[in-house]
């Protein structure tokens, strides 16, 4: 700034719009809040303060009416937030139902031979190396899809998700 003879003055919070850095950060905060309330218009506290002064001038300095208007705006913002929360909850339930419909129900019995799918195998993909390893022996079948399998080669047992196994 000294090289180009630019004078930069830090402004107070009452004149935040004259400081470019503060204005940019306020815009970013506003964009984030708008995403949280599903693209509804939102107001930062500094915006509410400026709107309060504007409302006081418009309503001929009636403090009670201006205060009620601000409280209504804050209540609307809270309603938008609650509505966004409910929409998010409904969406998550819908995605869970879709996911659960796509799951294939598999039943295993102790002593059965199974293969285990290795999703982390990236060394030799494709036709050269199979992602199914095993065979393993089913030791215990737990509720909710958990299966304990036993590896006879390494003499160890471990629990896996039943969706990663096939007969």
Image (tube, rainbow, N blue to C red):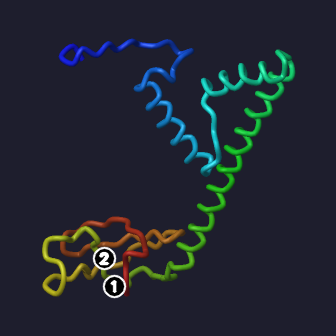
**Left or right, residue 149 beside residue 69:** left
**Looking at this view, is 159 or 29 the one in front?**
29
Q: Is 167 situated above or below 34?
A: below
Q: Secondary structure at mark 1?
A: strand
Q: How crowded is the residue under tag 1: few (<14 C-alpha within 10 Å), some, or many (20+)?
A: some
**Looking at this view, is 84 or 113 the one in front?**
84
Q: Which mark is residue 5?
A: none
**Looking at this view, is 80 or 92 the one in front?**
80
The location of residue 59, given as percent across then percent down, is: 84, 22
The answer to the question of whether label 1 and label 2 lie on touching residues, with beta carbons closer than 8 A, is: no
Q: How many marks?
A: 2
* Quarter residue 128 falls in: bottom left
How far is mark 1 from mark 2, CA to CA?
14 Å
Q: Residue at x 57, y 78 (%)?
A: 101
**Left or right, residue 137 beside residue 20:** left
**Left or right, residue 158 beside residue 77:** left
Q: Is 13 situated above or below 35?
A: above
Residue that mark 2 sits on? 117
Q: How crowded is the residue under tag 2: few (<14 C-alpha within 10 Å), some, or many (20+)?
A: some
Q: Residue at x 43, y 74 (%)?
A: 162
Q: Is residue 63 visible?
A: no
Q: Residue at x 44, y 32 (%)?
A: 24
Point out the image quarter for the C terminus.
Answer: bottom left
**Left or right, residue 109 beside residue 2:** right
Point out the image quarter for the N terminus.
Answer: top left
Residue that mark 1 sits on? 113
**Looking at this view, is 120 or 19 the one in front?**
19
The location of residue 123, given as percent across then percent down, is: 14, 71
The location of residue 41, given as percent across then percent down, is: 64, 43
Q: Is residue 82 visible?
A: yes
Q: Secondary structure at mark 2?
A: strand
Q: Is 47 situated above or below 64?
A: below
């Amino acid at each position: 700034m000294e090289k180009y003879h630019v004078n930069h003055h830090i402004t107070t919070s009452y004149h935040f719009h004259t400081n470019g850095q503060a204005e940019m950060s306020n815009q970013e905060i506003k964009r984030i809040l708008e995403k949280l309330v599903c693209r509804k218009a939102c107001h930062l506290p500094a915006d509410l303060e400026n709107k309060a002064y504007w409302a006081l001038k418009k309503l001929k300095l009636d403090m009670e009416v201006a205060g009620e208007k601000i409280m209504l705006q804050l209540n609307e913002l809270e309603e938008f937030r609650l509505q966004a929360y409910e929409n998010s909850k409904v969406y998550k339930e819908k995605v869970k139902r879709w996911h659960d419909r796509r799951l294939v129900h598999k039943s295993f019995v102790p002593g059965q031979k199974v293969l285990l799918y290795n999703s982390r195998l990236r060394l030799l993909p494709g036709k050269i190396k199979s992602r199914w390893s095993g065979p393993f022996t089913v030791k215990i079948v737990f509720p909710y899809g958990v299966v304990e399998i036993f590896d006879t080669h390494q003499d160890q047992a471990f629990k896996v998700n039943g969706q990663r196994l096939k007969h």
